Image (cartoon, rainbow, N blue to C red):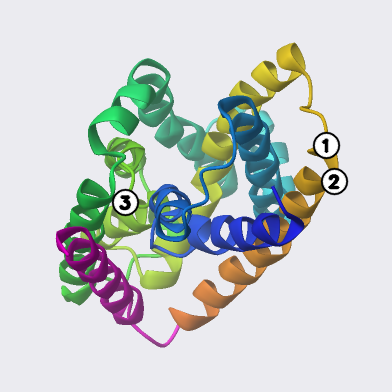
């Protein structure tokens, strides 16, 4: 893989992991569109490890202060009743990650087989984009993140299972669920980003096991480092930009992009 392909894919992963536009969908569409089929399976798995590590660094770096509070208060909540707001949230983040972790462990490869081609990805981009627009347009959505309850976390976690389908978007579907449950835009996005940390960590750890067993393919170490750095920087900027944008604007730009991209892919396949 040339270094510039690593930069492009790192940018795609970092931006689309946190913008509600689907990282898994983009990481399939970009190589498909440009004919980048020169990586064998072992190289692809190794590079996926690098990309997930980069986005994990990004979200941990951005929320480092909040994460420190969540870890301390979450552990303290084990022996304290009632728990603090941050202590409850810490465990809600864990609970919300469980449905996707369980289903993903069993069926993730099946989702790739069933929905990993350009047409299903394009349809998912459009359908779940319109669902985000509908949820975002509903009135009376003013709950803050501290108001999240256990049942809210469970519902958002169940919604996250749909993100195993390439083209759905993990952040997009969890933000959609948060908005449907009455969270403010910023609160829904913040909850979606932080709850993604256990999921991204799990994906990284699972892929890392295979990399440790097989070893880093020859000639890929520098390319992986480029992917990590690019995904980390672009991921941090995506989190920062999204949280700033949604304080005063809707998710309409992301919806428009999803629908436009989906339509372009469908037309390209049909021609």
Decide which of 97, 232 is in the foreground and name it: 232
Start-end of magenta stretch: 247-271
Looking at the rendering, which quadrant does residue 232 occupy? Answer: bottom right
Image position, residue 213 (x, y; %): 73, 11
Picture mark count:
3
Helix, strand or loop at disc 3? loop
Marks 2 and 1: in contact by CB < 8 Å?
yes
Residue pointed to by mark 1: 219
Q: Which residue is drawn at 36% across and 41% down?
A: 153
Decide which of 90, 199 is in the foreground and name it: 199
Disc with the residue nearer the chain's start (1 vs 3): 3
Q: Residues within 10 Å of mark 3 (few under 14, many from 20)?
A: many
Image position, residue 72 (x, y; %): 73, 38
Residue pointed to by mark 2: 222
Disc 3 versus disc 2: nearer the observer: 2
Judged left or right of residue 241, residue 28 is: left
Real-space Cα separation, disc 1 to disc 3, in angstroms:
31 Å
Question: Is residue 79 visible to us here?
Answer: no
Judged left or right of residue 210, residue 145 is: left
Disc with the residue nearer the chain's start (3 vs 2): 3
Looking at the rendering, which quadrant does residue 116 occupy? Answer: top left
Decide which of 167, 203 is in the foreground and name it: 167
Q: Which mark is residue 167?
A: 3
Helix, strand or loop at disc 1? loop
**Residue 266 drawn in magenta:** yes
Q: Which residue is drawn at 65% across and 32% down?
A: 43
């Amino acid at each position: 893989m040339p270094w510039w392909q690593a930069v492009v894919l790192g940018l795609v992963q970092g931006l689309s992991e946190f913008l509600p536009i689907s990282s898994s969908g983009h990481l399939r569409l970009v190589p498909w569109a440009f004919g980048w089929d020169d990586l064998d399976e072992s190289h692809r798995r190794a590079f996926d490890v690098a990309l997930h590590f980069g986005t994990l660094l990004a979200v941990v770096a951005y929320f480092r202060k909040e994460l420190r509070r969540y870890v301390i208060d979450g552990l303290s909540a084990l022996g304290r009743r009632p728990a603090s707001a941050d202590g409850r949230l810490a465990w809600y983040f864990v609970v919300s990650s469980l449905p996707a972790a369980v289903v993903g462990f069993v069926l993730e490869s099946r989702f790739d087989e069933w929905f990993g081609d350009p047409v299903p990805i394009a349809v998912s981009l459009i359908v779940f984009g319109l669902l985000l627009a509908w949820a975002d347009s509903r009135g009376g959505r003013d709950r803050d993140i501290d108001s999240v309850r256990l049942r809210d976390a469970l519902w958002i976690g169940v919604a996250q299972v749909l993100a195993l389908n390439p083209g759905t978007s993990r952040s997009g579907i969890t933000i959609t669920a948060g908005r449907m449950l009455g969270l403010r835009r910023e609160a829904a996005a913040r909850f979606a980003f932080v709850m993604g940390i256990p999921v991204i960590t799990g994906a990284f750890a699972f892929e890392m096991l295979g990399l440790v067993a097989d070893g880093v393919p020859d000639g890929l170490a520098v390319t992986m480092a480029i992917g990590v750095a690019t995904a980390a920087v672009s991921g941090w900027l995506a989190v920062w930009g999204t949280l700033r944008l949604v304080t005063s604007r809707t998710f309409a730009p992301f919806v428009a992009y999803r629908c436009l991209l989906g339509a372009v892919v469908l037309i390209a396949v049909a021609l």
